[in-house]
Amino acid sequence: MTFEELKRMSHSDLDMILSQLLNYIPLSNSYDAYHDRWGIYPKYCINVEDSLYVQNHALNVDRNLYVNNLYSVCYGFEKDKELPWDILNVAHLIQATPRQRVEAAYLTLKKE
């Protein structure tokens, strides 16, 4: 999946894909109108706590890759590896939205 396709993906579709990557078992087999499909998945893209869970998993897989993916998601381009990190870059990454954290986690976990 390309970066552009990831950006166009709906929250519910990305939530479901991440649930599959994390081997999450749906809470029930009932129909969930929010997701327009069977099963209830965490709302990683909009819930801060759920997005931090995914972020933690991605950090455990590959910290460097996750941070670089988060930079790419937040800024829209890859960080020049020759340039040092500065406090403004770090502050911007700390303020990432749940959706940005989830996108970076997906990019990290799909490599697993």
Image (cartoon, helix red, strand yellow):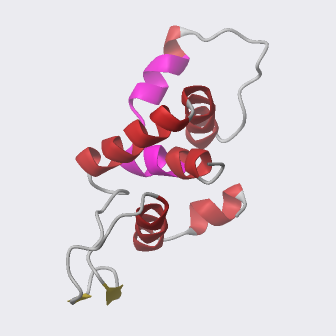
Query: Is 112 drawn above or below residue 27 in the view shown?
Result: above
From what the image shows, is residue 21 above or below residue 77?
A: below
Magenta highlight on residue 102: yes
Front-lying residue, 45 or 31 = 31
Find residue 104 and report its image quarter: top right
Residue sitting at 54 percent across and 28 percent down? 63
Instruction: Tell me which residue sits at (49%, 67%) in the image.
Output: 17
Using the image as rendered, state which of residue 7 and residue 42 is in the foreground.
42
3 vs 11: above or below: above
Residue for point 59% across, 60% down = 7
Say left or right for 101 vs 110. Answer: left
Residue 39 on the magenta segment: no
In the figure, residue 28 lies in which quadrant?
Answer: bottom left
Q: Is residue 73 left or right of 23 when viewed as pictured? A: right
Left or right: 46, with 69 as reference point: left
On the image, the x and y values in percent for residue 100 come to 47, 46
- Locate residue 29, reporting x and y percent: 24, 87
Q: Which region of the structure is painted magenta?
A: 89-103
Residue 14 in the image, given as x and y percentages of width and height: 47, 66
Please provide percent x and percent y for residue 98.
37, 47
Prevailing SS of the magenta stretch? helix
* Quadrant of image for the N terminus: bottom right
Residue 62 falls left or right of residue 31:
right
